[in-house]
Amino acid sequence: MMTTNIAKLKSLKGNPPKAQSQIDVIGGDKRSEAIELKPLQVRIPKDVFEEFSECAGKQFGFSHGSKKKLFLKMWEIYKAQTMKT
C-alpha cells in the first residue's frame, strides 16, 4: 500500500508529489546459480501438491526453493536405488 505525505501535497500547488526512490531489489540480486536451471512442469492432483509442499516446508523451511530441494533430494535417492549394479 502506498501512502501519500499530505504535507508534500500542500507545498507543491498544482503538481503531484514526487515519487519516493526505492531500492532496486531485482537488479541488486547478486545470487548466481552454480549450474544452468531448466523448469520442470508437471500436473499433479491438488492434494498431492499440498502434501509435497508441506513436506518440503517441514524439511527445508517454508521458504523459496524448498520444493526444489526436496525434489533434488528425492532424485538423488531414486538414482542411488535404481543405478545399483
Image: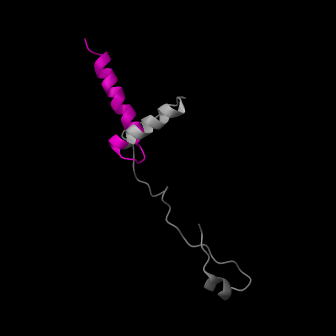
Compared across the picture, whether 37 is left or right of 44 comes to left
The reply to whether residue 26 is in sight is yes
> Horizontal placement of 34 versus 43: left or right?
left
Colouring method of the image: one colour
* Vertical side of 59 occupied by 42: above or below: above
What percent of the width, then of the height, locates residue 77? 31, 25
Nearest the camera: 59 or 19?
Answer: 59
Q: Quadrant of the C terminus?
A: top left
- Residue 25 screen position, x and y as percent: 48, 59
**Residue 48 x, y percent position in the rendering:** 48, 31
Q: Quadrant of residue 37?
A: top left
Residue at 44% across / 35% down in the picture?
51
> Which corner quadrant of the image does residue 36 belong to?
top left
Residue 80 in the magenta stretch? The answer is yes
At 37% from the left and 38% from the top, the residue drawn is 69
State which quadrant residue 65 falls in.
top left
Query: Does 71 sit above or below residue 3?
Result: above
Q: Main secondary structure of the magenta part?
A: helix
Q: Which range of residues does the magenta coloring cover? A: 58-85
Residue 18 shown in magenta: no
Q: Is residue 69 left or right of residue 1?
A: left
In the rendered image of this protein, does residue 54 appear above or below residue 16?
Answer: above
Between 21 and 72, the one lying in front of the other is 72
As drawn, which residue projects farthest toward the front? 47
Tally of numbered tags? 0
Q: Along the line of sight, which residue is nearer the eye, 28 or 84?
A: 84
Task: Confirm whether residue 37 shows in the render.
Answer: no
- Name the residue at the top extreme: 85
* Residue at image point 33% right, 32% down: 73
Q: Residue at x 65, y 88 (%)?
A: 11
Q: Position of residue 70 (x, y in %)?
A: 37, 35
Quadrant holding the N terminus: bottom right
